[in-house]
Image: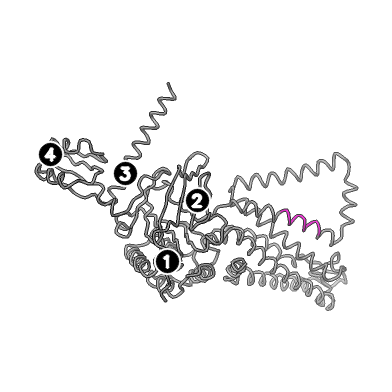
Amino acid sequence: MNRPLHTEPEAPVIELRSVCKRFKDTTALDSVSLSLAGNRIYGLLGRNGAGKTTLMSVLTGQGFHSSGEVRVLGGSPYENDSVLNRICFIRESQKYPDDFTPLQAFKSAALFFRHWDADFALQLAGEFQLPLKRRIKKLSRGQLSAVGVVIGLASRAEITFFDEPYLGLDAVARQIFYDRLVQDFSDYPRTIILSSHLIDEVANLLEHVILIDRGRIVLDDDAEAIRGSAVTVTGAASKVEPFVAGLTVLHRETLASLASVTVEAGLTEAQRSEAADLGLEIAPVSLQQLVVRKTLAAAEEFSANAAATEMEVSR
Amino acid sequence: MNRVLNVARMQLINKWTFLGIPAIIMASAFLITLAIWALIPETGETKYAGSGQAVMWYFLALGIQSLTLTFPFSQAMSVSRRTFYLGTLGLFAVVALATSVIYYVLGLVETATGGWGMNGQMYALGWIAAEPGPVQILFYFISMITLFMIGFWFATVYKRWQATGMLVAGIGTAAVLLGIVALITWQGRWPQVGQWFAAQTPQTVAGWAALFCAVLAAGSYLTLRRATP
């Protein structure tokens, strides 16, 4: 039963314009603007408290934004059943009705998600070795995560959000999740937004990466473009430094006369052969490394700005 | 509309919560009361018991539970707050109506059997039992809805503002009640208040309670509109 594509490819399914979310003493989302095309797998990356869950809550009408405009599938998601019934968001700390079993949670999901596939849900539950008739409140953390993963996958919602779905899942269960996600995505294309800490593990799944830090979007690009966007140059410090002069340096490590500098630049052929002539080693930067470097660089910039503001104020 | 019905169906997936546990409470309260009456020596006087209302208090707890646990789950099921609200209240209204009819019928049986053969009064309580059937049913119905709405509203306040909200709501309610008492005392109006209460009939009490419910229902909805799971 192959269903037609839910939405036209490349049509934006999510659009955010200058969305801010302020809590009493923090800014969880700081003027976020995004436009996401449909039928792709997005990685929403960032540190704890960077604003990932807040962003997903706003996108699903579960949370509120302070200002800006949010459009999901052409409408505002807040209290809008015609948008809501096409999306699925299981929170990382999802609560279930008292005494519910996984099977009862799946029965509920069948009532509300129109593309719900009950057989698929049972198959997944079997693979995760989920006890279907045990009360959810008695499940382990990993099993609790598995309930959310099963609902998210089997809902086949046009936009499905996974918020750190692997918490407590062992390596085997995580691999099952990644495999089923990719498999089911190719059978039933839809938009998947996956927030994750385990960047290396999910790097190969992602088609597009959004990096958020302190509520700001630091990076929003195709995974393919990002992979080529930074390199690490290693060699004698005296030769590395002139080579990277003028490039955006993300990270610098030195050990005696050796230097290893990560630069944000796709090197040209000429540059690569120049490096080879100088005896410098060029290595690609993994997505995880890049995310760490970008986040730390953003943090430095942030504290530098804050210090500058403070000095302005004290003057 | 379909999704509203589905919210009600979702609440009934676990049959125990809305149907099983209330049935057990009603049955056990009834049987325990009968047992107690059987132990009391027969003196010819009527034996009263408040145990018939036991299930009503369960509905207060249910109002709290349906919000604290089922509401966050309904959000994960992509149900809007409005749909959740209508489905939950609608289902509860049906359950409360059914329970009210059962109360009324049990009251009739109680009267017909001479207080379960033991001259007891559990359901056909004097003040209400004299009224026509529909009034009795309405009275029970409104009472249950009131308790449910109190639980539901307090739970929405908790959901939105946590302990601070509960504290403010609790102290606020106490302050308002105290203010009213102080005003009556200061004005020396207690005799009139006493007369007013004595003049109330089940119909008028139901009317006031219905008004109170309407205020709570509107308040709950407005609070829930901005609540996060």
Of mark 4 and mark 1, the one earlier in the sequence is: 1
Tell me if label 2 and label 3 are in contact, CB under 8 Å: no
Task: Give yes or no for contact between labels 4 and 1 (Cβ–Cβ under 8 Å).
Answer: no
Q: Residues within 10 Å of mark 2 (few under 14, many from 20)?
A: many
Callouts 4 and 3 on one subunit: yes
Label 3, secondary structure: give it.
Answer: helix
Q: Residue at label 2?
A: A70
The C terminus of chain A, quarter of image: top left
Mark found first going from the N terminus, 4 or 3: 4
Choose the circle earlier in sequence order: 2 or 3.
2
Mark number displayed over residue A236: 4
Which residues, given as a range, are shown in magenta? Answer: B207-215
Q: State the residue position of label 1.
A: A153
CA–CA distance in space, label 1 to label 3? 31 Å
Out of B16 and A89, give the one closest to the viewer.
A89
Type of residue at label 4?
Answer: Ala
For residue A241, what is the image quadrant?
A: top left
Cα separation, mark 4 vs mark 1, equals 50 Å
The question of residue A190 being in magenta is answered with: no
Q: Is tag 1's residue or tag 2's residue first in the polypeptide sequence?
A: 2
